[in-house]
Amino acid sequence: MSLLVKETQKDLRSRIIDALGRAVANGELPAEPIPDFNIEKPANSANGDFSANVALAGAKAFKCAPGKIAESIINNLDLDGTLFEKAEIAGPGFLNFYLSQKYYSEIVKDVIRKGTDY
């Protein structure tokens, strides 16, 4: 597996946490500890390349509806300069993230660079 996959997931987690921090700073969400949340690959690729349950996981801590948390995250999420094309709210508060073509180009470059060691 390419290290890029793990790095991309780690970067996404960091950007979600940063978005939560901005939402707290501008008063959209209360100042509470960020709950543990999962980032995973959805079973159905129509639901994006990665999915996060952060809004659902944070409902109790932030004492508000998952949809409001998800909206605050999306409003404060900065994907500029990342390998992500877009993010969307899905269902009762899941966030779906879609990778850009640049991500796939970087994977191909990594495979070629590693050759038989991939």
Image: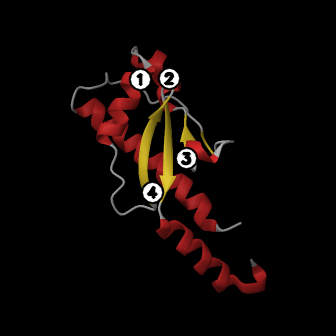
How far apart are labels 1 and 3 at the CA level?
Answer: 18 Å
Three-letter code for the amino acid on which mark 3 is drawn: Gly
Q: Please, which colouring scheme is shown?
A: secondary structure
- Identify the residue under disc 1: 67
User: Element at badge 4?
Assistant: strand
Instruction: Find the distance from the CA under tag 4 to the CA under tag 2.
Output: 22 Å
Placement of 48 over or under 52, stated as above or below: below
The spot of residue 17 in percent (x, y) is 41, 41
In this view, 107 is above or below 114: above
Sequence order check, earlier mark of 2 and 3: 3
Q: Tell which of 89 and 57 is nearer to you.
A: 89
Give percent across and percent down for residue 81: 36, 63
Q: Which mark is residue 50?
A: none
Name the residue carrying label 4.
84
As drawn, the label of residue 92 is 2
Q: Secondary structure at mark 1?
A: helix
Quick one: label 1 or label 3, which is nearer the N terminus? 3
Quick one: label 1 or label 2, which is nearer the N terminus?
1
Q: How many numbered marks does the figure carry? A: 4
Which quarter of the rendering shows the N terminus? Answer: bottom right
The amino acid type of the residue labelled 4 equals Phe
Residue drawn at x 51%, y 24% is 56
22 or 110: nearer the viewer? 110
Q: Secondary structure at mark 2?
A: loop
Mark 3: give few (<14), some (14-19) or many (20+) Cα within 10 Å.
some
Residue tagged by mark 3?
Answer: 48
Residue at the location (50% across, 41% down)? 96
At 72% from the left and 85% from the top, the residue drawn is 115
Occupied quadrant, residue 40: top right
Using the image, determine if residue 2 lies above or below residue 66.
below
Please name the amino acid that badge 2 sits on: Pro
Image quadrant where residue 27 sits: top left
